[in-house]
Image (cartoon, rainbow, N blue to C red):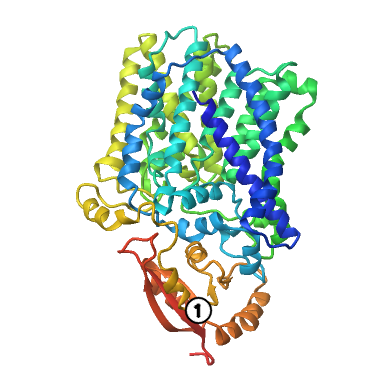
Amino acid sequence: MRKPFIFLLVIFSLWIWSLDATDILFYYLKRSYSTVSLFTVSLLPFSILSFYFIRLFRKYFTEEKQVIGISHKKTDYLFVLAFLTPVIYLNVARIYFPDVSYDIGSYHLYLQELNRFDNLKNFNMVGSGAGGTYFFTLSYKFFGIFRHLLGFRMGAILNTLLFFVCFTSLFDLIKMIVKESNGINRLPVFFIGLICLFAIWADNTLIIINSYVVDFLGIPILIELLIIVLFRKLHATNGKNILMLFFLLASLLIAYKLTFIPYALVLSIALIIRNREYFLKKKQMLLTGLITLLFPLLYMIYNYTETQNPIFPLYNAVFKSPLFEIRNFKDERWGPRSIAEVFYYNIVCALDKSRTNEWRFFSVRLLGEYFIIISGMLYLAINKFRIKDRFMQLLLLISAIAISFNYLLLITTGYYRYGIIVEILFGLCLALWLMYFLQFKKYILFFALLVLCSVQSINTFNRIFKRGTNYSWYDYPSIKKDRPEFVKQQKHLLLHDRQSGIEKEIASLQIDGFLSSDCDGYIRILSPQSPIFNITAYGNRKKLITDFEEKVIDSFSQKHHLYFLARKENVFQKLQELAEKNYETEKVLCIYPSFTYIETPLYLFRIKKCSVQQ
């Protein structure tokens, strides 16, 4: 079922990566380009990569049909759509409202539009731009394409489409588990769909519907890698093909976002352990490492030549880029505060929900399944790792992978939005344990676990649906109370918000440049030709940054029209920061681009450096 959707996801990713590769090539050749020339030149790497992946996929799925042999009826697709009705409803309920969350306006939109000449024009004079300026752009441009085609509001539909891809991947995974199990009877399609729905029925998944958050993009690829680990054995005839496909997909996954690295690492280790004879015999270890670097290496080379840090601004205590503080960036609000706390952090979050995320959401499944997995691992150890039942083997292996994901997530970021796959696998394991207890008539355990699953499902429903579908990366209006009025105000913009809608107003201002703010993404859309000057303390060469302010920005503000953009919620804070840097406001405009709410305008300030310190 998943075959065409995984294929389209990969091919589309290869196309965007080819565009990025061409953009970087033109950058190093110091040649500007048109959109037509960018698309034309990118056809060469795209064609080569696509041809190779098509061959890999054809062999891979042909063997899967022979070895595993799961089949589907046409009605299965109707079941998938039926079970995804809540997700579709959620998207429809939010479709009129633009995603105005902080990160989107700060750097997501900037990266969606980025060509590398922008970074040179804007930030490379001394300091870098906001921390996200040099993030890998593949996943952001994925969403950018949809935004350009469908407009700002409809462009976020990509996450809903990814739910469909994820659902079909889980559907195939569960069918494979059932087919290989010798103790589980044939499972009706209805119950397979129910398990898939429960797996994705989590706060951190549903909250991203109709959002430009990119963390769901890699989930279908992760599930595909899991399928390979669980069901494909490498041998002389198929080893090279599966090996290449696995590590190329892992490479693509890392190029989406660096937060996927821990999960790709766990699955790679699991594949090597399960096929250790093949790896030792063929001496493939070096090759796998080189393959995995293929797609992210493009961005790492660019970042290193520009900043001296291949994953700028992360781990700058190691790479010591002069453009960022010498420290390893981590949001200290989230995650364990000691090594020991890693092993009981789920209990900590259950007791203190402020440690989880901005909304104090903590899913019961993260606590309940954590203890169930630990119990399963103890059961495995007691039996000296000798489990004959194939279903239990698969369940315990998935559990081991899920708990490894959880620990590595906590060690790296501690933020469960970056670990959506953890919530999905925990949910899948809970559903599989329910199947096991029911099949073998362990009714007390079955009903106890059913209560846990029901409590989590109801909690998620109450948070996301009953309270008015108003929890997302921006608080959407309540369906029952506020939504009708908001829809009336916003519906005329649906499919008509590809541009800001205030181009003439912006053009009349004769904007020559901007000071960098937390609105760089908005600036990139409003005035794409205007340079953005950063003076917000990024970098560790303070004297050079001070010289840059005095020799470049100060004189620029005296001779040209320099502007600053701020959001309604922090406009006074930003004005104070400008005053501290000795800038005065000459003009203020309240603007209403098509990608904001009427209630949340942006404030545009024309500013100038004071000639005398106030």
Q: Say whether residue 367 is left or right of residue 306.
A: left
**Res 492 → quadrant:** bottom left
At which x and y percent is residue 513? 55, 75
Q: Is residue 245 above or below residue 336?
A: above
Judging by the rendered image, the residue that carries numbered circle 1 is 510
604 or 475, which lies in front?
A: 604
At which x and y percent is residue 110? 53, 59
**Residue type marked 1:** Gln
**Res 83 → quadrant:** top left
381 or 505, which lies in front?
A: 505
At which x and y percent is residue 199? 41, 29
For label 1, the SS is loop
At which x and y percent is residue 23? 67, 54
Residue extending farthest left: 481
Residue extending farthest bottom: 612
**Res 9 → quadrant:** top right
- Residue placed at 37% from the left, 24% from the top? 78
- Residue placed at 51% from the left, 31% from the top? 5
Q: Is residue 558 above or below residue 67?
A: below
- Count residues near mark 1 (Cα–Cα under 10 Å), then give few for <14, some for 14-19, many for 20+: few
- Residue placed at 54% from the left, 26% from the top? 3
Kindly tell me whether residue 325 is visible in this rendering: no
Q: Say whether residue 415 is left or right of residue 194.
A: right
